[in-house]
Image: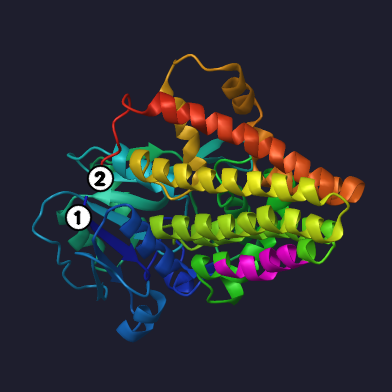
Amino acid sequence: MTDALIVACGTGFQGESLEDFLEFSVGGLTQVRRLVRSCLKSGIDDITVVSTASESTLRRMLPESVSGDAKITFTAPGTVFAERDRGGKVLILQANLFFQMPLLEKFIKESPSTGGAVLMKTSENDSTGTKITKPLGAAIVEPEAVADLLEDCNLSRWVGRYRMEGITEYENSEGLYAINLDAESFSGARRLIASTVGKTSTGWIAKNINGKLSLPISLWLACNTSLTPNHISVLTNIVAGVPCIIAYLTGYPFLGAVFMQIAAILDRCDGEVARLKLLETKRGEWVDTISDQLTIGGFVISVPVGYYIHGDNQHLALWLGLLNLSIFLFFLVWSFIFMVRYTKSGSLVSYHRIDELLGNAPLSPVRRLMAFLRPVMRRNFYSLAFVFLAAAGGYMWILIVTTMGLVGIFLHQLEDIFRIRGRVPRKES
């Protein structure tokens, strides 16, 4: 499927006026821009926006740049749909549809490539408890059907007639529904955002503590600023990472641990804003990863240096500091090599794929122990743990626990290197 039609005027499938939604914004993104980006991310590269608004008004609502062979055009009701001569069906999206990307991709993938129209529907109970189905704002049709639809952009009338002629109904309404301009549906959209923009691989602390603190910040950043996810990644280092390092260097380990925890919370914001605004890219993953490792590297260096200057055991600070820095650099080099050679991701979360690549190979007791302890090795856990360690024992406890964790990671990765070499093909770029 290479063509899509975004209907931003006329009447929707449920009789709503679609012009009311032209500039409606959820999560800092207007509906027209959200739908265009959704189509582009789904591999659709020819998009037509149907609206009575001027082209200059619509241009302001669209993504800043469109790369490759992608094409965005504008048309008014009653005009001819200029479909590229490539065959295939056309995706219809009405302007008030708010959805999760995986569901749109699933709808496109599971719809038959031949035959009549396919309509997305949702089920709900009426006031008597009877289950009724209603059409949602998505359909997949043959190119010939678009001309009739464009006559007056009355999707309700159009789908009524097509139901008489036979139409396939696709029901998968979990998280995919049409937004109405009222408080109830707007809060529903916000709840959907809250349930989907968090990190996909995370732990209890991240979901129930850090995530609940970061999401309001992310929503505010998305709705009230023009900051990109990459800007936020860098700002997180400046706002929390730098103060963390300064606090450790100047003799305030508890304050340093607090800033480390703040950095862990703010670290979620770049990814959440990227998912809110559909701006996830591989480059963004790398910027986030490198920014995170700069903060963590600063922590690895500043703790022993601060302990050496302000503590009572300079030998311990010196030798454990050198050991920690050496292992951290080894960790970075091997992790980045693994990500480039064996995954298509720029996120360190992808390192967990090592288990899948190794398969059922027998593991050493240390490797099994580290796999078991992975949840406590996550930044969301150890950043919070260091706050309590700093309060209880200052530099020394933080330094010793950091060394224990890094030594375990070193043994874990050393075994990974020997086991993966020569038995797993590199990932093709």
Judging by the rendered image, the residue that carries numbered circle 2 is 117
Residue under the image location 85 percent in, 62 percent down? 252
Q: Nearer the viewer, residue 386 or 278?
A: 386
Q: Nearer the viewer, residue 374 or 49?
A: 374
Q: Secondary structure at mark 1?
A: helix
Residue 423, quarter of the rendered image? top left
Residue under the image location 69 percent in, 46 percent down? 380
Q: What amino acid is found at the position of numbered circle 2 in the picture?
A: Ala
Q: Is residue 134 visible?
A: no
Q: Which mark is residue 316?
A: none
Judging by the rendered image, the residue that carries numbered circle 1 is 145
What distance separates the C-alpha of mark 2 from that of mark 1? Answer: 9 Å
Q: What amino acid is found at the position of numbered circle 1 in the picture?
A: Ala
Range covered by the magenta-colored residues = 234-246
| Crowd tier of the residue under label 2, counting other residues whose Cα lies within 10 Å: few below 14, some 14–19, many 20 or above | many
Are the two marked residues, 2 and 1, in contact with CB atoms closer than 8 angstroms?
Answer: yes
Question: Principal SS element in the magenta part?
Answer: helix
Q: Residue 292, image x and y in percent? A: 58, 56
Q: Earlier in the sequence, mark 2 or mark 1?
A: 2
Q: Secondary structure at mark 2?
A: loop
Residue 242 within the magenta-colored segment of the rendering? yes
Q: Relative to residue 60, is residue 352 depicted above or below?
A: above
